[in-house]
Amino acid sequence: MSVLVYTENWDGKFKKLSFELVSYATGVAKMLSTSVTAVSIGKVDESELKKLGNYGADKIISVSNDQLIALDSQAYTSVISEISQKENATVIIISNNNTGKAIAPRLSVRLKAGVGSGVSKLPLNLNPFTVYKRTYSGNAFAHVVIKSDVKIITLAQNSFDLIEIANNATIENLNVPIDGSLLKTVVKDVQKQTGKIVLTDADIVVSGGRGMKSPDNWPSLVELATLLGAATACSRPVSDEGWRPNDEHTGQTGKIIAPNLYIAVGISGATQHLAGISSSKYIVAINTDKDAPIFEASQYGIVGDAMKVLPKLVAAVKEIK
């Protein structure tokens, strides 16, 4: 019996997300008095793989197969399923991102496993196995009981602190044969974004809404983001108007993010927007309307005109730096 955790890598490197998953898996394993097996798919150097051991992984299975260079949810599901059965895993942990949302349901069918999606805490109880998740755009919570023998948990990003543990993990290189009929994804071209912090990876996000009044007023928001080493984002009306690129749109119909700090400038806080940012650890709101819904979701708020507040924030950050 073990806890299996699938750790994504990007061009052979792990990000905070992967270490968060292993930290969480280690917490679950302690509750179950068992070990943690981390699975990595793709070409990753041994020195990089060993980093997973620093967060509690006892064993690391590295699957390097040229057929798995491109993410194909069917093929990846097959690999993870086979390894989980080989390791006799009773709990499988995956990130609640686009990859996890594609793999978890397929894995559930293959293993006849119940799924707890978007979980943000360690299990509340082992018998029955009960997990905690936020619902209704973060306005409520649910206790989900998983009764199946094998349980799948998708962990909400940035919901669990990294816990470093000195652990000399063993590394096993595994070549899993792939059924060619499962490989449906073909990558024809790769275009990488450069010179800009990826929104879904950012620890700090500075976001603007219609309260910015005009696309001409964005330089001060971008300057604040640059000073803070933050990514820039926007609400849907802003991207619909063409003020900002669509890839900056956060919310239920855009990108769902969970940074450590989310600064909402001139955003009223519609339910659809809050659904995409409610998992942020800290939300700071700047709005002229003291009754704006965004203030109910924020830990800190400034009632004021963004055009007057932003320059003062920029000056304050420059002074501190």
Image (spheres, grey):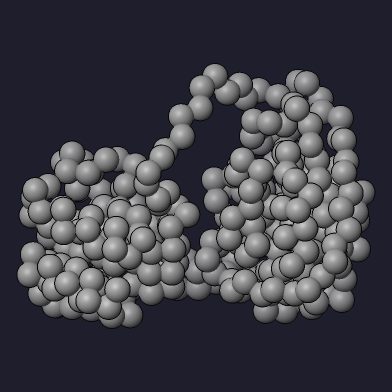
- Image quadrant in which you'd find residue 23: bottom right
Q: Nearer the viewer, residue 160 or 216?
A: 216
Q: Position of residue 202 (x, y in %)?
A: 43, 58
User: From where the camera sits, is residue 246 visible?
Assistant: yes
Query: What is the quadrant of the C terminus in the image?
Result: bottom left
Residue 64 drawn at (x, y percent): 79, 36
**18 and 293: which one is in front?**
18
The answer to whether residue 289 of the structure is visible from this angle is no
The residue located at (68%, 31%) in the rendering is: 69
Residue 1 pos. (x, y %): 91, 63
Q: Using residue 272 as the reference point, say whether residue 158 is left or right of it.
A: right
Residue at point 50% right, 69% down?
A: 134
Rendered view: 69 above or below 230: above
Left or right: residue 151 versus residue 268 is: right
Residue 32, picture quadrant = bottom right
Residue 36 sits in quarter? bottom right
Is 289 or 158 nearer to us in this picture? 158
Residue at left offset 29%, top offset 67%? 263
Check the image and report above or below for 259 versus 112: below
Query: Where in the figure is residue 98, as x and y percent of width and height?
Result: 54, 45
What residue do we see at 72% from left, 39% from top?
A: 42
